[in-house]
Structure formats: structure tokens, C-alpha cells
Amino acid sequence: MSDRRNFLKITGLTAGSMLIGVSVPASEKVVYINSKAAGLGSTMKLKFRPYELQLKHVFTIANNSRTTTPVMLTEIEYDGITGYGEASMPPYLGESHKSVADFLSKVDLTIFKDPFQTEDIISYIDSIAIGNYAAKASLDIALHDLTGKLLQQPWFKLWGLNSSKTPNTSFTIGMDTPEIVKQKVHEAEIFKILKVKLGRDNDKEMISTIRSVTNVPICVDVNQGWKDREMALDMIHWLALQGVVFIEQPMSKHAVEDMAWLTEKSPLPVMADEAVQTVHDVLAVNKVYSGINIKLMKCGGMRNAYKMACMAKTMGMKVMIGCMTETSCAISAAAQLSPLADWADLDGNLLINNDIYDGVKIVDGKVTLSDLPGIGISLR
């Protein structure tokens, strides 16, 4: 095993063990744990630090607005190779820099001698505390990046997926004034589908404004904003005439009967977002929604996301791979799953102006994977 590891290092798999050249505010200090593991080749070392994403525009959805998103950047080092991960924490997830740091501080990866024992490692991480899915995702992503680098393969290949089958990604247009909405649409000219946030009292104005400047297909995300199912159905019929291709989470995740009724009568596919978080939720939303939106930060990472996609496809449901506002680290991790998806919404890194990674590319609107090992990223 040691000869193999030396060979891997010689063949150029080193990814660097520090976040080099990044300007970080004093409050975003690096936190080291497992520092007793000073030697290489026998234990995994975890470190993490907080970071704040700066959004290019105010991001407004049905129930809140924000200009920043807190994230936690993680690294797992083993035998001189580093895997990178990320926890993104938009307000509705209920996680924070403090909660993620508290969780990660309880993790001791030195008890594992082999990073390929992923089932045991992730089961151990899950057992530390319930919830904390973004924190868990940061470890899961870093572990996948690490093991992919050790194997010299990207994860889409390890899953047996075809990179030519990646979908176009949507680009998100948040709620705003007509002038700003038009500006955002012009900035998104390379994209073949737009995702529009609805759920307030100006829904038709939003769609009409976009239609005044482009005819590209639209999907809409209501973020549980509609309260009446009859009104929701009328709105969906109107949206279908405007070139909308599917509706995401139109009503409350708790309105199960109303959602099943709406999905049955809707002329467009109805996707679950807030209504489905983990693997355990997939079966419950079958027949209530047409499909599911899978996000690494909601389900705990790549391992669970892959399971959810396979479950949904087995039940004949549509699959969407989504994201939060994230760096190219988490976006590239999610993109490894994109050949399984009917739709992708992987634009979170494009909504920020302080990304510290290079990763998956959008070429002519399409998610385009590279052959870089792991999750396919490098430090800028």
C-alpha cells in the first residue's frame, strides 16, 4: 500500500495542503483539529475555516433577501494529498459558522487509517449528531475529493456516468425591479434556461418582464410562496403559456394533500425542493410531486445525493441537481452527479464575486465536466 501511495504522489496528484494566496478577514481564521497527527501516510487530518460569500446582486426569494452567504471551507489531508469540501449555510437551513464549527470540532478522523472506508467514515460522522447536514456535506465532499484524487479519477467516472449526458444548467433570476431583472437576464445570455424566483404579489410582472427581453425556456421556483391550490393551478396554466417548463415547490411542504392534487392536475411537472431533504424523504414525496430537487447541503453530501437520484429514477420521478450560493467546490461536487439529472441548477458559484476555486465550467449553457480527479477543482 505504501508503494502505491508513493507512486500516486510521484505521478503528480498533489493538490496542496493549504488555502494559499487567499485574502481572508481576521475573523475567518483557520481552525486546526487532529493536530496530533503530524506524520503523513497513516492518518487523515481535518482543518476548516469560515468564509463569507459576497453576492453580485441582492438575492430575493419569496420569504427573504440577502447579500451574503456564510460557508465553511474544509480540507482532509492524507499522505500529502488534500481533498476539499464546503458547507454553505443559507438562512433557512438553520446552520451557522458556529454550529458547523462546533460539529466539525467533534470529528476525529485519526481513528480511521484508510480513507477508502467511506461507509464506516460517513456512518461515524452521521452518528455524531442529528441534522447538521451542511456540516456533514463539507466532510463528505472533501472525502470524495480525496479518494478520487488517490484513484486519479473524477467521481462521475467512478460512478460510471457519461459526461456527454450532462444537462444545461439554469441561471437564477431573483425577485427585483423590472430594470434590474432585465439587467440580470442580459447577464445570463449564454444560458439556455432561466430559473425565476416567484411567490410574491408580482409573479406575472416578473415573467412578463423577462419575456419582454428573451424567449428562452423558464423554470420557476416559488419557495412555498403560494397558499391556495386553485390559484396555484390557474397560475401554472398561465405559466405554461409563457414557455415555463416546470414548477418548483409551489406550496408549503406541509400541504401534502394540496400538493398531490396540484401535481395531478398540473400541465407542468411539479418538483419538490423544501419537501425533500434526505434519502428518507424520497419515498414519501412519490406521487405527491413529479420529481425532486437534490442539494448536497440538504442531504449531507455526494453519497446521499447519488442514492436519492437512483431512488427517484427507479420510481419514475424526475431528477434535478440543485445548489445553494456556493463556491466552485460544492458546485463541482454536485456537477459530478449531473449526468443522472433531467435538469440542473448549478449556478451558485456564478452568483458570487469572491470564489476561490476553479472548477466545473458552463459552456454554451451546458454543465461541462473535466477529467480532473476527485470533484475536479483547483485553487485560484
Image: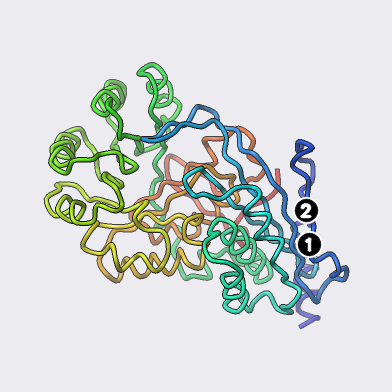
Secondary element under disc 1, as helix, strand or loop, is: loop
Relative image position of residue 217 (x, y in whole percent): 28, 37
Secondary element under disc 2, as helix, strand or loop, is: strand
Q: What residue would you read off at disc 1?
A: 33
Residue type highlighted by circle 2: Val
In this image, 174 relative to 4: left or right? Answer: left
Relative image position of residue 89 (x, y in whole percent): 55, 47
Check the image and report above or below for 268 versus 294. Answer: above
Relative image position of residue 5 (x, y in whole percent): 77, 75
Task: Assign the N terminus to one quadrant of the image.
Answer: bottom right
Residue 31 badge: 2
Q: Are marks 1 and 2 in contact (CB under 8 Å)?
A: yes
Residue type highlighted by circle 1: Ile
Relative image position of residue 51 (x, y in whole percent): 67, 42
What is the residue that sits farthest to the bottom in this orientation?
1
Q: Quadrant of residue 52?
A: top right
Packing grade of label 2 (10 A; few <14, some 14-19, many >=20) is some
In this image, 200 relative to 176: left or right? Answer: left
Q: Quadrant of residue 235?
A: top left
Task: Assign the C terminus to one quadrant of the image.
Answer: top right
